Image (cartoon, rainbow, N blue to C red):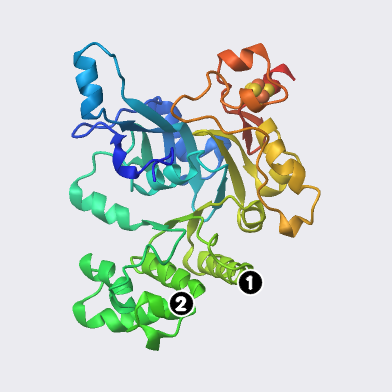
C-alpha cells in the first residue's frame, strides 16, 4: 500500500530518472554527517538531506478535465522530508513513529530499495550515487532488509534451500556445489535445523519463518540490516527469542541495525539510540536511556506519557491525541503544531530545525530556542 493507504500502483516514485539525484545539503554538511556529528566515529551509513515524494499521476478523466480548463493537479505524498541520519558501525538505531510517519519508507531508502527524490546516501563517507553498476551491486549486498511478514516475503513455491541459497549463488559468493552446505551453515546460525532445508515456507511456524528471512538476509554477508517491524507479527515469547537472536548476531557478525518498530518496549530493549519521526521528519534523536528518561520534543513526550505509567517492560505504543495529518497536505511550519499543546504563532509559520540540545541529543522544537 502507498503511504496514504491507496494501492501502491496508483503512485509513482518521484525521482530524477536517468539523471543524478540532486543533493540538497552542502558538501561540508554532508561530510560532517558522514563523519558523525561532534567528533563521533565515522558513520557506516549516512543519509544526508534525504527526501522521498510519491506522485499520483492524473487519470484520463482528470487529463480531459484539464484540457477543458479544470486545473486538476497531481497528488504528491511527502513521505520523507530532508532527513539527516548518520549510523555508526555496530550501532542499533531504533526508528519510531506513528503509522504513516514515513519510517518504513526511510528504511527502504536507506537500503536502496527506493530511489531518493532528493539527498544522498554515503557508505563510510563515500557517496553511493553514480557508482558503476558492478560496484553498486557489490555495495547493495552490504545492506539488506528484513520484512515484517516473513510469510509474505518468502516465495511459497521455493524450498528453503533455494530461498536462502539463491542470492549468494547468483552473486557468485558460492559455487553451485556449495549451496547445500552453505545454506546449512546459515540455518544453523539462526537456530534452525539444516535437515529441514528441503521444506517449503508453509511447513514452518511463524517464528521459524522469521528465522528463514534472517538467514536469507545474512546469506549475502551484509554489514547493515534494516529490520522493518520484524518481530511485530510474532507472539510475545517468540518475539523475545528473535530479538535475542538479533543481538547475538550483532555481536557475532559485527552487524549494524536500523530497527523500525511501533513498539516502544522493543525499541527500548534493543536500541542504542532512538530516532523519532513525525510526518516524514525526524523530530528527536538521542541515546535510548536519556531519551526515555527525559523526552524533549512534545511529540516524544506524548508518545511516552501514558506508557510511563505502566510497567516499563510492557510499554506499548499509545496513539497521540488527534489524527496524524495527511502527507498529501502536511501542515506548514512544524508539522506537529495542530496536535501540540505548546504551539505558538511561529510554529505555524516556520519549521523548527533539528538542533543539538545535549551531547548526542537532537530535537526539532521552537521551545528549545525560547528556553
Ligand atoms: Fe509544538 Fe511548536 Fe515545538 Fe512544534 S515547534 S512541537 S508546535 S512547540
Res. 71 in view: yes
Q: Horizontal placement of 130 versus 250: left or right?
A: left
Secondary structure category for the residue under label 2? helix
Position of 113 relative to 73 (above/below): below
Q: Give the image quarter of residue 34.
A: top left
Q: Give the image quarter of residue 242.
A: bottom right
Q: Which residue is mark 1?
A: 237
Q: Cβ(mark 1) to ligand 1 < 8 Å?
A: no
Where ligand 1 lies, by quadrant?
A: top right
Q: Give the image quarter of residue 313.
A: bottom right
Q: Relative to the observer, which residue lies in front, 228 or 56?
A: 56
- Packing grade of label 1 (10 A; few <14, some 14-19, many >=20) is few
Horizontal and vertical percent for residue 159?
Answer: 30, 78
Return the disc, 2 or 1, that comes first in the chain's sequence: 2
User: Which tag is nearer the camera, tag 2 or tag 1?
Assistant: 1
Q: Which mark is residue 311?
A: none
Horizontal and vertical percent for residue 161?
Answer: 31, 78
Position of 162 relative to 52 (above/below): below
Q: Cβ(mark 2) to ligand 1 < 8 Å?
A: no
Residue at 34% across, 47% down: 112
Q: Horizontal placement of 255 versus 353: left or right?
A: left
The single residue placed furthest to the right in the displayed view is 309
The single residue placed furthest to the bottom in the displayed view is 195
Position of 286 relative to 265 (above/below): above
Horizontal and vertical percent for residue 176?
Answer: 20, 78
Alpha carbon distance from label 2 to label 1: 20 Å
Horizontal and vertical percent for residue 356?
Answer: 63, 30
Residue at 27% across, 56% down: 138
Q: Which residue is mark 2?
A: 189
Amino acid at each position: 500500500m502507498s503511504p496514504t493507504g491507496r494501492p501502491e500502483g496508483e503512485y509513482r516514485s518521484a525521482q530524477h530518472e536517468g539523471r543524478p539525484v540532486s543533493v540538497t545539503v552542502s558538501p561540508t554538511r554532508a561530510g560532517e554527517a558522514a563523519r558523525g556529528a561532534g567528533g563521533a566515529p565515522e558513520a557506516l551509513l549516512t543519509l544526508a538531506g534525504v527526501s522521498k515524494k510519491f506522485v499520483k499521476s492524473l487519470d484520463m478523466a482528470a487529463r480531459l478535465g484539464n484540457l477543458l480548463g479544470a486545473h486538476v493537479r497531481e497528488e504528491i505524498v511527502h513521505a520523507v522530508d530532508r532527513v539527516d541520519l548518520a549510523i555508526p558501525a555496530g550501532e542499533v538505531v531504533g526508528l519510531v513513529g506513528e503509522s504513516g510517519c514515513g519510517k518504513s519508507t526511510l528504511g527502504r531508502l536507506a537500503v536502496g530499495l527506493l530511489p531518493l527524490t532528493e539527498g544522498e546516501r554515503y557508505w563510510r563517507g563515500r557517496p553511493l550515487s553514480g557508482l558503476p553498476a558492478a560496484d553498486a551491486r557489490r555495495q547493495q549486498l552490504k545492506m539488506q532488509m528484513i520484512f515484517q511478514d516473513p510469510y509474505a516475503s518468502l516465495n511459497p513455491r521455493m524450498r528453503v534451500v533455494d530461498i536462502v541459497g539463491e542470492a549468494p549463488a547468483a552473486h557468485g559468493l558460492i559455487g553451485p556445489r556449495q549451496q547445500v552446505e552453505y545454506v546449512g551453515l546459515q540455518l544453523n546460525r539462526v537456530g534452525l535445523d539444516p535437515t529441514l532445508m528441503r521444506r517449503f515456507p508453509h511447513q514452518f511456524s511463524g517464528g521459524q519463518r522469521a528465522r528463514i528471512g534472517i538467514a536469507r538476509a545474512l546469506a549475502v554477508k551484509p554489514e547493515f540490516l534494516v529490520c522493518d517491524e520484524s518481530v511485530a507479527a510474532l507472539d510475545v515469547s517468540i518475539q523475545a527469542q528473535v530479538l535475542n537472536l538479533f543481538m547475538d548476531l550483532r555481536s557475532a557478525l559485527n552487524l549494524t541495525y536500523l530497527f523500525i518498530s511501533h513498539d516502544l518496549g522493543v525499541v527500548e530493549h534493543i536500541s542504542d539510540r532512538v530516532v523519532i519521526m513525525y510526518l516524514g521528519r525526524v523530530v528527536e534523536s538521542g541515546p535510548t536511556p536519556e531519551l526515555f528518561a527525559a523526552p524533549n520534543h512534545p511529540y516524544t513526550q506524548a508518545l511516552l506519557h501514558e506508557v510511563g505509567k505502566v510497567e516499563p517492560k510492557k510499554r506499548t505504543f499509545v496513539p497521540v491525541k488527534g489524527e496524524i495529518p495527511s502527507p498529501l497536505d502536511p501542515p506548514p511550519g512544524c508539522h506537529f503544531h495542530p496536535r501540540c499543546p505548546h504551539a505558538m504563532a511561529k510554529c505555524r509559520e516556520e519549521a523548527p530545525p533539528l538542533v543539538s540540545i545535549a551531547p548526542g541529543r537532537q530535537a526539532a522544537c521552537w521551545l528549545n530556542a525560547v528556553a
